[in-house]
């Protein structure tokens, strides 16, 4: 069991069920969480540095004042999370967060500084990325259906293989972004133009 206020380093936690539990002022450095359930848990003032969450369920977790420097989520559910509660650097993430083959649907990153975030092969349906700094982000092969992009900085972002996105080039910064066809055709939909076959 994880004790409030304790620091943990290079430990592996397997098959924990901490649904609706409260973790307060814990610090985890290079720890691994495998097949752990944190559904509706409350993380408060916790630090996760270079931690790995694999095959975990963190749906509806609350994360006020938590930091996730270099955290990696693999094959996990991280649904319905308000990531704006977390602590993000005012400048850039010195070690970006990474999601791989995860479900992040119905979450919000509104206004967060997420430079270099990786969200590969994920399901990110109805996610709020408005006013978010996604410079050099990697969304390759991610489903972005119904996700919101407005005043979002996607400079240098990689959206090759991403699908179902609706991004208005006039309302977002796309300098140096990478897209692939045929999905990139959706960038033209917001323009007042007529496309003739």
Image (cartoon, rainbow, N blue to C red):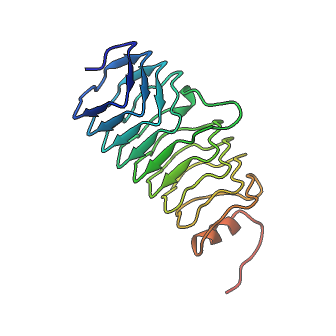
Q: Quadrant of the N terminus?
A: top left
Q: Residue at x 54, y 26 (%)?
A: 85
Vertical relation: 39 (above or below) 124: above
Residue 7 locus on image (x, y percent) = 40, 19
Residue 162 locus on image (x, y percent) = 53, 63
Vertical relation: 168 (above or below) 96: below
Figure quadrant of residue 174: bottom right
**Residue at the far top in the pictured view:** 5
Vertical relation: 119 (above or below) 191: above
Q: Residue at x 38, y 48 (%)?
A: 74
Picture mark count: 0
Front-most of residues 57 and 143: 57
**Residue at the far bottom in the pictured view:** 197
Q: Quadrant of the C terminus?
A: bottom right
Q: Can residue 37 be seen in the rendering of this structure? A: no
Front-most of residues 143 and 72: 72
170 sits left or right of 13 in the view: right
127 sits left or right of 92 in the view: left
**Residue at the far front in the pictured view:** 10
Q: Residue at x 66, y 36 (%)?
A: 111
Front-most of residues 45 and 10: 10
Front-most of residues 23 and 71: 71
139 sits left or right of 72 in the view: right
Figure quadrant of residue 23: top left
Residue 72 locus on image (x, y percent) = 44, 43
């Amino acid at each position: 069991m994880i004790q409030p206020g304790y620091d943990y380093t290079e430990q592996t936690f397997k098959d924990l069920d901490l649904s609706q539990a409260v973790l307060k002022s814990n610090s985890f450095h290079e720890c691994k969480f495998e097949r752990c359930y944190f559904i509706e848990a409350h993380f408060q003032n916790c630090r996760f540095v270079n931690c790995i969450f694999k095959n975990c369920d963190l749906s509806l977790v609350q994360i006020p004042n938590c930091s996730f420097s270099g955290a990696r989520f693999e094959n996990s559910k991280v649904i319905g999370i308000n990531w704006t509660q977390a602590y993000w650097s005012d400048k850039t993430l010195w070690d970006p967060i990474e999601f791989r083959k995860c479900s992040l649907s119905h979450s919000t990153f509104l206004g967060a500084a997420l430079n270099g975030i990786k969200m590969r092969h994920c399901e990110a349906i109805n996610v709020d990325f408005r006013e978010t700094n996604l410079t050099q982000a990697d969304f390759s092969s991610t489903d972005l259906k119904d996700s919101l992009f407005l005043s979002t900085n996607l400079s240098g972002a990689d959206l090759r293989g991403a699908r179902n996105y609706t991004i208005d080039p006039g309302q977002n910064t796309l300098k140096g972004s990478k897209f692939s066809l045929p999905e990139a055709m959706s960038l033209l939909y917001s323009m007042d133009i007529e496309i003739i076959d």
